[in-house]
Image (cartoon, rainbow, N blue to C red):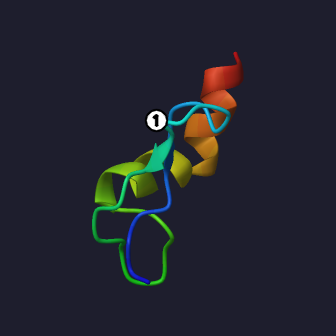
Amino acid sequence: ERTCKWPVGDPATPDFWFCGLPSQPGKPYCEAHVGVAFQPMSARRDRKR
């Protein structure tokens, strides 16, 4: 399946769903969610400060 697996909402509720847009090659997420999930190491370090 080549759809985005980004979870949306609370899994304990009936309105929980996955993004479902086409995923990027070799990634489990669409273009927008790849940008959120796979951030450069320096960006993650800066966020903690």
Q: Nearer the viewer, residue 17 or 38?
A: 17
Position of 46 relative to 34 (above/below): above
Residue at (43%, 57%) from the top-left corner?
34
Q: Is residue 31 left or right of residue 38?
A: left
Position of 38 relative to 22 (above/below): above
Residue 39 visible within the image: no
Percent position (x, y) of residue 9? 51, 32
Percent position (x, y) of residue 39? 53, 48
Percent position (x, y) of residue 21? 28, 62
Percent position (x, y) of residue 30? 35, 62
Disc 1 target residue: 15
Residue at (50%, 61%) from the top-left corner?
5
Q: Nearer the viewer, residue 38 or 5?
A: 5
Classify mark 1: helix, strand or loop. Answer: loop
Position of 41 relative to 47 (above/below): below
**Amino acid at pointer 1:** Asp
Residue, far top: 49
Q: Is residue 45 left or right of residue 26?
A: right
Q: Quadrant of residue 45?
A: top right
Which quadrant does the N terminus fall into? bottom left
